[in-house]
Amino acid sequence: MTYDPLTYWRERGKTYWRDFRPERYREQETALEAVLRSFAFASVLDVGCGFGRIGELVYAINPDVNYLGVDLSPDQIAAARRCLPPSARFAVVDARRLDLTARYDLVIASEVLMHVPPEDVENVASRLRRIGRHVVTVDWEAPGETAGSYCFGHDYEKLLPGAEVVRVGRQAIRHWQ
């Protein structure tokens, strides 16, 4: 069977938030918070917002942020609505089809690019760079390898050239501006 992110996340998104183990992500969130606090932002596009975990971090840093969370999964968005402030906006959107007319101070994609098939990842990374003054990604690092039928290792240096990199175990947080 061929991997299709839309099909996979529409199904996986139904239970992902229930299966999530927050203790596995504390170190990542601490490092990500430090990166996000290193610059100012008033508007955020959270690509692959999931159940709102990164949105909570964004709001903790800037409670007045103009936030838009997008995800493939309506179920993930429903979960995010429950934990983020009423001012948060959401849309079911495929990262491969992001609106290129909008601009954001921060575009964040946590554990998103690794789920984008190799034939689409350059397009997605280009879209992120075009709409974000700051782009922050978090992904597992395994260039050229796959970590399962739904997880790809990409050449992140090529996708976000010149990005500052913070390593957290086998993951990397990249800040491109």
Image (cartoon, helix red, strand yellow):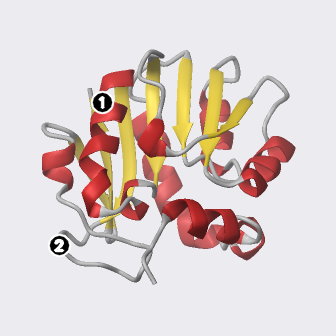
Residue 114, how many percent across, how many down? 37, 62
Residue 82, how many percent across, how many down? 86, 45
Under circle 2, the secondary element is loop
Q: Residue at x 43, y 50 (%)?
A: 31
Question: Is 105 on the left-hand or right-hand side of 78?
Answer: left
In this view of the protein, which residue sits in the foreground, 145 or 11? 11
Q: Residue at x 38, y 46 (%)?
A: 137
Q: Which mark is residue 55?
A: none
- The type of residue carrying mark 1 is Arg
- The type of residue carrying mark 2 is Gly
Q: Which mark is residue 129?
A: 1
In this view of the protein, which residue sits in the foreground, 177 or 50? 50
Answer above or below: position of 101 versus 111.
Answer: above
Residue 128, how many percent across, how many down? 36, 34
Question: Is 100 on the left-hand or right-hand side of 80?
Answer: left
Residue 58, how many percent across, how many down? 60, 34
Residue 132 seen from this side: no
Query: Mark 1 or mark 2: which comes first in sequence?
Result: 1
Q: Give the distance between the C-alpha atoms of the residues marked 1 and 2, in whole angstroms.
A: 22 Å
Q: Which mark is residue 144?
A: 2
